[in-house]
Amino acid sequence: MSVLFVCLGNICRSPLAEAALRAEAEKAGIALELDSAGTGDWHIGSPPDRRAQAVALGHGIDISSYRGRQVSPEDFRRFDHIFALDAENLKNLRRIRPADGKADLRLLMDLVPGREGSDVTDPYFGEDAGFDRTWGDVTRAGRAIVAMLRK
Ligand code: 4NP
């Protein structure tokens, strides 16, 4: 099973979502192929934002080796599940989805009871506390994905 997370820059939210699911899947003993990407192209080849790295490391996960990349139509053929971190990115993903793309495309927080339809807010331009909020959101989503894949 393969899962791709997509946000705008691929340096804040989607790397944290990837890290959180990696941790939850490991705990659950589920083998997953995981990656993250951005709809934008500004941070191709860049490591995650230092604040995202700090939050992940605070939870015991080193994401310093992650590198930004831009999502491509090919990702819809490669991955089983693609999760958009917010509605704007979901809209842009629907636009580039190829006719033969097999990936199940969904808004990430739709999996979390009580949070359906909501965005994982972009913490990039805000204060450090925003990254803790992001971590909480993507951890809840990671647990929900593990529960979904177990069924
Ligand atoms: P992300 O956050 O989509 O969670 O990675 C952002 C990072 C960078 C930019 C926007 C959002 N930016 O405009 O450079």
Image: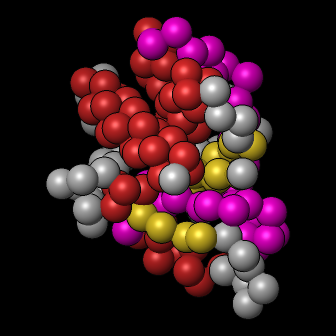
Residue 121 in the image: x percent, y percent?
A: 30, 48
Residue at point 72% right, 35% down?
31
Residue at the extreme bottom:
99
Q: Is any atom of residue 10 visible in this view?
A: yes
Choose between 22 and 8: the one closer to the eye: 22
Q: Does the magenta-highlighted stretch encompass residue 81?
A: yes
Q: Is any atom of residue 53 visible in this view?
A: no
Q: Does the magenta-highlighted stretch encompass residue 150?
A: no
The residues colored magenta run: 59-87
Choose between 8 and 99: the one closer to the eye: 99
| 110 up-or-down from 141: above or below | below
- Count of numbered tags: 0
Residue at point 78% right, 85% down?
100
Residue 102 in the image: x percent, y percent?
A: 72, 76
Residue 51 in the image: x percent, y percent?
A: 44, 22
Per the picture, the main secondary structure of the magenta-coloured stretch is: loop
| 32 up-or-down from 58: above or below | below
